[in-house]
Image: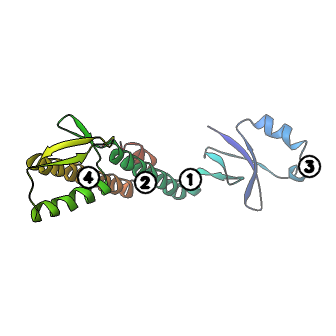
């Protein structure tokens, strides 16, 4: 696509894809009437209230897109933790706090073994678990947390290695 533009002091002050329209606009902008209408196939966009060639800010745009993708990854990660896990048809928390609580209880169980214990599910309802079931629940929580953390690391590596917007768009964030 051809763009027509007027440049003053090395800054694009006016541009359009229609040459006649830019010529008409100039009639109402006498400060630019003596300036040459230039033609280019380069993409021009408005950025920070200034017209710029996209190619001149590609690195900046890519960096911003990477920051946006990292924010999306972090939101998806937190959402994955909030979803919890299903164990024995019961819904349980699966986040750092759940890991701390279950880890602390495991330490206590080593000092004071029990056959059964009461544990709270995702909705704070009491669930009776055997010691073995509790160990299995802890394992499931730890494995899920590790899975989320490893996937997050993979997503962040992919963002870091992305060289184009297309590379970023191809990163599908699924936990």
Distance from Cα at disc 2 to Cα at disc 3: 46 Å
Residue topped by disc 2: 70
Q: Pointers 2 and 1 in contact (CB under 8 A)?
A: no
User: Which residue in the structure is indicated by mark 4?
Assistant: 145
Figure disc tally = 4
Residue 55 got which mark?
A: 1
* Pointer 2 or 1: first along the chain: 1
Q: Which labelled disc corresponds to residue 30?
A: 3
> Viewer-proximal residue, 108 or 24?
108
Q: Earlier in the sequence, mark 2 or mark 3?
A: 3
Q: Are marks 1 and 4 in contact (CB under 8 Å)?
A: no
Q: Against 143, is 22 above or below?
A: above
Under circle 2, the secondary element is: helix
Which one is earlier in the sequence, the residue at label 1 or at label 3?
A: 3
Q: Quadrant of residue 56?
A: bottom right
Q: Quadrant of the N terminus?
A: top right
């Amino acid at each position: 696509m051809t763009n027509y533009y007027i440049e003053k002091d090395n800054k694009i002050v006016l541009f359009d894809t229609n040459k006649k329209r830019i010529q008409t606009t100039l009639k109402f902008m006498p400060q630019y009437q003596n300036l040459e209408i230039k033609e280019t196939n380069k993409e021009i966009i408005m950025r920070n209230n200034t017209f710029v060639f996209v190619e001149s800010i590609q690195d900046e745009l890519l960096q911003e897109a990477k920051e946006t993708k990292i924010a999306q990854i972090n939101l998806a990660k937190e959402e994955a933790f909030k979803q919890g896990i299903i164990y024995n048809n019961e819904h349980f928390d699966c986040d750092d706090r759940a890991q701390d609580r279950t880890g602390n209880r495991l330490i206590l169980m080593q000092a004071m073994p029990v056959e059964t214990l009461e544990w709270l599910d995702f909705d704070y309802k009491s669930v009776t678990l055997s010691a073995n079931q509790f160990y299995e629940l802890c394992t499931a929580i730890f494995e899920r947390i590790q899975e989320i953390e490893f996937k997050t690391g993979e997503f962040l590596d992919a963002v870091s290695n992305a060289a184009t917007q297309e590379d970023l768009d191809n990163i599908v964030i699924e936990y």
